[in-house]
Image (cartoon, rainbow, N blue to C red):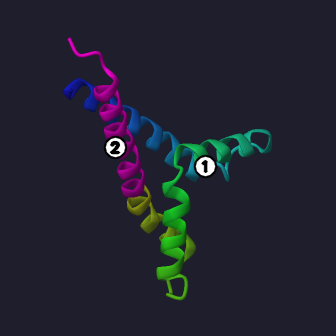
Amino acid sequence: MKKALATWMVAFAFVQLTGLACMWMWRYAPPATSSFVWGTALVALFPGNMLSAILIEKLFWTSRMSLPVMAVVEIPVLLSINALFWFGLAAAMRRLRRRHSPRG
C-alpha cells in the first residue's frame, strides 16, 4: 500500500512539474514546437489549470495584480485541485481493485 502511494506521488510530481515547465516555457519555444509544448502543459495540468484560472480570474481580475503575478498565485491552487483529483482517482481505483479482487 505504501509502495502504491509512493508511486502515485512520484507520478503526480513528475506530471505536474512537466506541465508547469511547459506552461512557463511555451512562449519561448521555437514556433515549430510551441503548440506541442502548450498542449503538453494543457493535458498535464488538467483539470486544475482550467478551474484555477477561472477561480483566480473571478477573485483578482479587478485588482491591481499584474497577469504574471496572477499566474504565480494560480500555481498553488492548480496543484491543490490536481492533487485532490489524482489522489481521489487513486482511492477510487484502489476500492475498485479491492472490490473485484478474488477472495481466497
Question: Mark 2 — residue?
Answer: 87
**Crowd tier of the residue under label 1, counting other residues whose Cα lies within 10 Å: few below 14, some 14–19, many 20 or above:** some
User: Which quadrant of the structure image shows residue 102?
Assistant: top left
Viewer-side residue, 4 vs 63: 4
Residue at position x 51%, y 63% in the image: 51
**In what quadrant of the picture does the C terminus appear?**
top left
Whole-percent x and y of residue 31? Answer: 79, 45
Going by the numbered disc 1, the residue's amino acid type is Leu
Region of the chain picked out in magenta, as a range: 79-104
Question: Mark 1 — residue?
Answer: 42
Is residue 7 left or right of 41 when viewed as pictured? Answer: left
The question of residue 89 being in magenta is answered with yes
> Could you give the CA–CA distance between mark 1 and mark 2, rounded to whole angstroms?
19 Å
Outermost residue, top side: 104
Outermost residue, right side: 32
Q: Is residue 88 above or below residue 65?
A: above
